[in-house]
Image (cartoon, helix red, strand yellow):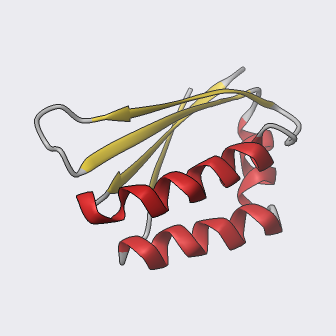
Amino acid sequence: MSVKIFIKRTVPATKIPELTVLLKRMRSVTLMQPGYISGQTLKRLDKADECMVISTWRSVGDWNDWIKNEKRIAIQDEIDSLLGAETSYEIYE
């Protein structure tokens, strides 16, 4: 059964250009990961500094494999460092 991952970040306006570059790098790596189905990035309308990525995976096992991917970890560390906070993940089935 497929799963959806809700990835929430708070992004100051001054950090958007740098974050955009990192998210494009992350997406290019994600596209090569087995089990990845799709992803969508949304900007919250009532809170300009909040965004969410909704990522769809074939299974929770595929997601767990992705979480352990060394390239993903390196890019995610850059994202968290840039934003000064850890990214939040919620998994739904």
Quarter where residue 84 is shown: bottom left
Residue located at (17% from left, 44% from top): 48
Question: How many marks can you see?
Answer: 0
Please state if 52 lies on the left or on the right of 3 as rendered.
left
Residue located at (33% from left, 44% from top): 51
The answer to whether residue 39 of the structure is visible from this angle is: yes
**Which image quadrant: the N terminus?**
top right
Please state if 61 lies on the left or on the right of 85 as rendered.
right
**How far across and down, in percent of the image, does residue 78 sit?**
57, 74
**How far across and down, in percent of the image, does residue 44 sit?**
24, 35
- Position of residue 1 relative to residue 11, above or below, is above
Residue farthest toward the left in the current orientation of the protein: 46
**How far across and down, in percent of the image, does residue 6 sit?**
46, 39
Q: Nearer the viewer, residue 17 or 69?
A: 17
Please state if 90 lies on the left or on the right of 5 as rendered.
left
Q: Nearer the viewer, residue 31 or 89?
A: 31
The answer to whether residue 85 of the structure is visible from this angle is: no
Residue located at (69% from left, 22% from top): 2
Quarter where residue 10 is shown: bottom left
- Position of residue 8 relative to residue 38, above or below, is below
Residue farthest toward the top in the current orientation of the protein: 1
**Which image quadrant: the C terminus?**
top right
**How far across and down, in percent of the image, does residue 81 sit?**
47, 79
Residue located at (36% from left, 55% from top): 9
